[in-house]
Amino acid sequence: MMTDQAPSIEQLLDRFDHMVGQLDAASAFAKISYQGRVLDSARRLLEHPEGLSPLQARAARLDAAGIFAGTDWAVPAALLPGLVGNTLATAEPRTIVLECLSLLRLLSVVKGEHAIHGLPPEHARHFLTQVLALNLDRVMGSASEAARQSGGALAAGVDRLLARIMDQIGTEGILGRLVDEVWRILAQRPLQVNHVKSMILQIAVALDEGGNGLGEARLGADRLISALFGPTNLCREDPGLETYRERLAAADVGTLQSEASGMARAMHDTGLVSDYHAGLLGFILESGNTQLLPDALGLSSTGLDSLRCYQPLVHALIEECVRPGSGQAVLGIALMLERGILYSPPIAPSLWRLMGATLSPACENLLTTAFGTAVTPRQMLVAGVMMLLGQPLGIGQGNNPTCQAARALSMWALNDPDYLLWLLAQATSSDRVTMHFEGQPLDSSQLAAGLASHTPLDADPVSVLLVPHLDRIYAEMGRRVADRGEDPHKWINPELHGWWVGREFHIAVDVSTGMLRDHHAFLRAFHGAYHPLHNGNEPVIHPQPAGIAVTDSAGSFVGWHAISIIRVALDQAGAMRVYFFNPNNDSGQDWGQGIVVSTSGNGERLGEGSLPFGAFASRLYIFHDDGLPQSGTTTVDDEVIAEIHDMARNSWAADRVISG
């Protein structure tokens, strides 16, 4: 007898397994025709109250069968947690299902049920924690009714999935862990803070709706929330910019002084700039109360001297780029003044040129696409320049394979800012950048594509404009030396980055075989070049490019990565540490064998990561040396070299023949 009853979970699973089998058996070319059918079948399971457990159990098989092949989810290590919520809320059904399957895949990694190369369990857990944090409204059942109605039965399945993730990775202290994570990220002073602001907004909403589990982290949460939405007395209850300006206009001198100091305190405490801070600076300049500007920027004597010497320029920069929507430029301006780089003769005229420049239509379109229309493209670009010059170690490559370009921008902002501004002038005026390689000009507009498949829009304004050009030039340099039989960075790094890059080149592996070669000699050379106790106490004069073998928390090799060595010094505990810049948007990583990169608490300056000298050397595979003779050098004990060598041999070099 026929009935109208819905299929049972067993029937749904039988059909689903059959579809997955077809997908698995299909050729790489034909998989796309089967993916849609699998996603439709998976949707029915997501909508079924009992469908999540069997889907999670099949996550590894789905991944191996190719459900993510050819999609934006094909490389899980490159996914961004900030994009998940919008996909789950507004995408078409098949895309929502694909996002859900991706989350189940990560959950299975956390639970040890699936392994993905380059994505250790703690990274998967970290990703899922951020997803939960950014979607607390759904997790806590406070999503709008309109959003739920528009999602239908699939929305209920998504809510069940988020609840399952929270249940399996732990509910206790989720808000507290999120607060700690926000502070950890902000300690590195990144240029890109929109995702951090989204997290803080979610924390504020959760607390407003009675969220708990913060414990001792409550004070940290309140500091973050107030820094964004009410850093001072006149805006404590977040009254809106118009009301705030009215209050400023009616305030006495003492109150204005308190506002200026309070804004600066909140900014330097967190690394975040409130829109109210931007409003305050606008009021200061419009009202003529410029004596408040040093306090509003939180300047020391160094910054104050810079401001006094270049006051018209600083005022013009504030008027040009400090707006609600580009408020982070306030921190950039303050830190730029503290660096004293305006005293370098080319910088001030270069900044005047930037503010007077007419951007090409292509540049304007790129900046508008990346940052919207809240401020003009030129204002956003000037704001981005201020942020980069103030925070040279805050730049990151996002999820793009452009670590070389990001490192170059950081090094120029730190060491050669007038050259950076010259490159930017080229790009904005003629949509090209010309650099030279071994005496020959390289015009980015005439070169083939590099490593990045598309323009990076999830980046800071300077990167949005320059990275595509630099990526093409870097790739062309690689093509020109590809047949020399040695690592191309021997020639590329000095030509790309600048004259200060050491011409002595050291590499730990044989280029033709990839096997470890003369590793003991390599480690001794690194000590002799960089360790103060073995190089005559010579400091790192200029930031130097280097290459590391990135490993996961199990010590397994993940890939090669470009970083720059900033300095080597003793920490407060007396341990010698290497302080370096990692252009990956988050320097804190667990590289296995107890090697956990520190970003604060061990003498790090803003944006630096650090490791004990030996731990860093165990992951190093390329470095440069200036080749100058050094006095007072001492040899390194054999036991020290052997210990570092063993750390490399038992991690990234485990499958490489040891020859030295």
Image (cartoon, rainbow, N blue to C red):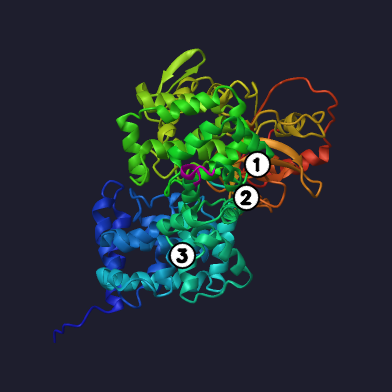
Relative vertical location of residue 361 with respect to residue 555 in this rendering, above or below: above
Is there CB contact under 8 Å for labels 1 and 2? yes
Specify the farthest residue to the top.
439
Left or right: where does residue 645 sit relative to residue 350?
A: right
Q: Amino acid at mark 2?
A: Trp
Q: Is residue 100 located in the magenta-colored stretch of the structure?
A: no
Pointer 1 or 3: first along the chain: 3
> Circle 2 sits on which residue?
591
Quarter of the image holding residue 25?
A: bottom left
Instruction: Point out residue 269 in the picture as x, y percentages from the top left corner.
Output: 61, 54
Residues in magenta?
A: 284-289
* Distance CA(mark 2)–CA(mark 3): 30 Å
User: The N terminus lies in which quarter of the figure?
Assistant: bottom left
* Distance CA(mark 1)–CA(mark 2): 9 Å
Quarter of the image holding residue 470?
A: top left
Q: Is residue 287 located in the magenta-colored stretch of the structure?
A: yes
Using the image as rendered, state which of residue 151 and residue 7 is in the foreground.
151
| Dot in front, 1 or 3 | 3
SS class of the residue under badge 1? loop
SS class of the residue under badge 2? loop
Give the crowd class for mark 3: few <14, some 14-19, many >=20 residues within 10 Å. Answer: many
Residue 619 circle label = 1
Pointer 1 or 2: first along the chain: 2
Specify the farthest residue to the bottom.
1
User: The C terminus lies in which quarter of the figure?
Assistant: top right
> Circle 3 sits on which residue?
202
Instruction: Point out residue 196 in the picture as x, y percentages from the top left corner.
Output: 49, 55
Q: Is residue 432 visible?
A: yes
Q: Amino acid at mark 3?
A: Gln
Left or right: where does residue 399 sit relative to residue 173?
A: left
Instruction: Point out residue 431 in the picture as x, y percentages from the top left corner.
Output: 36, 26
* Identity of the residue drawn at 41% across and 31% down: 450
